[in-house]
Image (cartoon, helix red, strand yellow):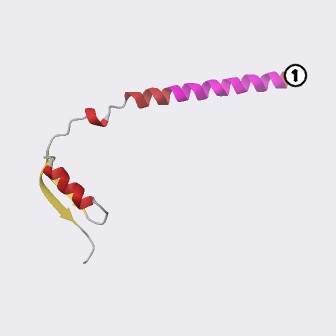
């Protein structure tokens, strides 16, 4: 019975070590992702806005006004 307990404790420590290594790997991966502010965007030929959601048109116009695209295309599929 005592050996089973030692084996269970050893298995638990092994599991915790694997979980800790996985957590460290995830944190290192997340830290290596470049921040959005550091990414430079080149102006596009056009910005395409798909209708149907709140604020999509306003956001498309704002992007065009900030120079992210030369033209703004608005596309919708609703018959009205």
Residue 57 or 48: which is nearer the viewer? Answer: 57
Q: Which residue was labeled with disc 1?
A: 2
**Residue 59 placement (x, y as % from top left):** 24, 55
At x 54%, y 29%, the residue is 23
Residue 49 relative to residue 33: left or right: left
Q: Is residue 77 above or below residue 38?
A: below
Q: Is residue 59 left or right of residue 5?
A: left
Is residue 10 part of the magenta span, yes or no? yes
Query: Over which residues does the magenta segment extend?
Result: 5-24
Q: Is residue 73 above or below residue 5?
A: below
**75 w.r.t. 35: above or below:** below
Is most of the magenta stretch helix, strand or loop?
A: helix
Query: On the image, which quarter does residue 73 sit in?
Result: bottom left
Residue 77: x %, y % from top left = 26, 70
* Residue 26 in picture, x, y percent from top left: 48, 31
Image quarter (top left, top right, bottom left or bottom right) of the C terminus: bottom left
Magenta-span inclusion, residue 12: yes
Q: Does the rendering let one see residue 27?
A: yes
Q: Secondary structure at mark 1?
A: helix
Q: Residue furthest right?
A: 1
The residue lying furthest to the bottom in this view is 80
């Amino acid at each position: 019975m005592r050996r089973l307990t030692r084996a269970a404790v050893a298995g638990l420590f092994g599991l915790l070590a694997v979980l800790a290594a996985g957590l460290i790997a995830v944190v290192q991966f997340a830290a290596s992702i470049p921040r959005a502010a550091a990414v430079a965007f080149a102006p596009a030929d056009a910005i395409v806005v798909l209708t149907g959601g709140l604020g999509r048109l306003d956001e498309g116009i704002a992007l065009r006004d900030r120079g992210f695209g030369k033209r703004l295309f608005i596309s919708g599929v609703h018959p009205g």
